[in-house]
Amino acid sequence: MKFLVILICLALNHFWLKDHDRFDDRWFFGFRQRVEALAQRVTRNAALWQPALAMIYVVPVALLLLVLELASGRMFGLLTMLVHVAVVLVAFDRSQPGRLAKRFLELRAAGDSEAIHAFLRKEFRGTREQRFDSDDELAWFFGKHLVHRSFERMFVFFFCYVATGPLGVLVAYLTYQLRDSHGEATHRAAVTIIDDAIRLIEWIPLRLVALSFSLAGNFVQCFNQLKKSFWEFGREVDHAGLLYGFASFALFGGLPRGDTAADSGTAESSGRDHQQYQIESLQALLERCQLLWLSALALLTIFSPIV
């Protein structure tokens, strides 16, 4: 069933959600505020953040367990599958890499810097603080965050669903939403715990994605980089930088930041063409990796009794 659920979700992402986001993640912001306000009233102490954090996890997980129990065994398992599809679809990224890359390249070709910055602020975390000194810097930023976003919002949930089912997907989704919705008033210890939880959640999927990059690109170069950083784990490790490095070695044998045709003294148009080629190559690599993961899941579905 898991292979079918993943296939349905990817198909819905590509066709049904192509132009409009039918699922709005903003519901979580209101839910978090209400839970934290309730916890403060009950405990009478805003510094006690643990009850609120626990409730944010317990309430959705308990509700999902109840829905799964009510759906169990009904309509020959169709209701259960629909619940799985809904959970995975809410967690999955509703913008495929190809759509993001196409939109960025269109804005870049039009030369509208304000529209480009608005697009990046909407799609990628941490863009507001960025200052881009050149077109090459802008393309590098987009490529790096395109890979990282696809990893966090597609491959991580892919892995969580296969390994732990809809409950694992929900827990990972709540953890990412907690990270993205915290404000200045959020207790520092809660932020640290959430960041550590994300690093733990991403540890195995990151290595699997790096291996997928190796299989879909330059195996020797990418796999050598993977071996060098395989056991790295900690707050100082930049997952976005690691992934972009793996992708660069898989595609180009390793390209340092700023090493483009424009930096080599060729015409500006040649540099822009090279940047477009890099972005399109990253998009194609991500899509090939999706196919690799689907193929692996299909094989597991055929030969493994637990999937």
Image (cartoon, rainbow, N blue to C red):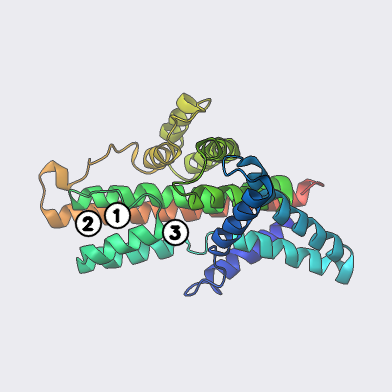
Q: Between disc 3 and disc 1, whose residue precedes?
A: 3
Cα gap from disc 2 to disc 3, whole angstroms: 19 Å
Q: Identity of the amino acid at label 1?
A: Tyr
- The location of residue 194, given as percent across then percent down, is 56, 40
Residue hosting label 1: 277
Q: Amino acid at mark 2?
A: Asp
Q: State the mark number for residue 45.
A: none
The structure residue drawn at horizontal position 85% and vertical position 60%, both measured from the top left corner, is 69
Residue position for label 3: 97
SS assignment at label 1: helix
- Image-based side of 162 in relation to 120, left or right: right
How far from the left and from the top, in percent, is residue 299?
A: 70, 49
Q: Residue at x 55, y 49 (%)?
A: 178
157 horizontally vs 98: left or right: right
Query: For the view shown, which residue lies furthest in the front direction?
Result: 44
Q: Position of residue 88 (x, y in %)?
A: 65, 59
Check whether the beta carbons of the residues at disc 2 and disc 3 lie within 8 A of each other.
no
According to the image, label 2 marks what residue? 273
Three-letter code for the amino acid on which mark 3 is drawn: Pro
Q: Nearer the viewer, residue 67 or 201?
A: 67
Q: Nearer the viewer, residue 166 or 287?
A: 166
2 or 3: mark nearer the eye: 3
Crowding at mark 2 (Cα within 10 Å: few <14, some 14-19, many 20+): few
Q: Secondary structure at mark 2?
A: helix
- Can residue 296 be seen in this snapshot? no
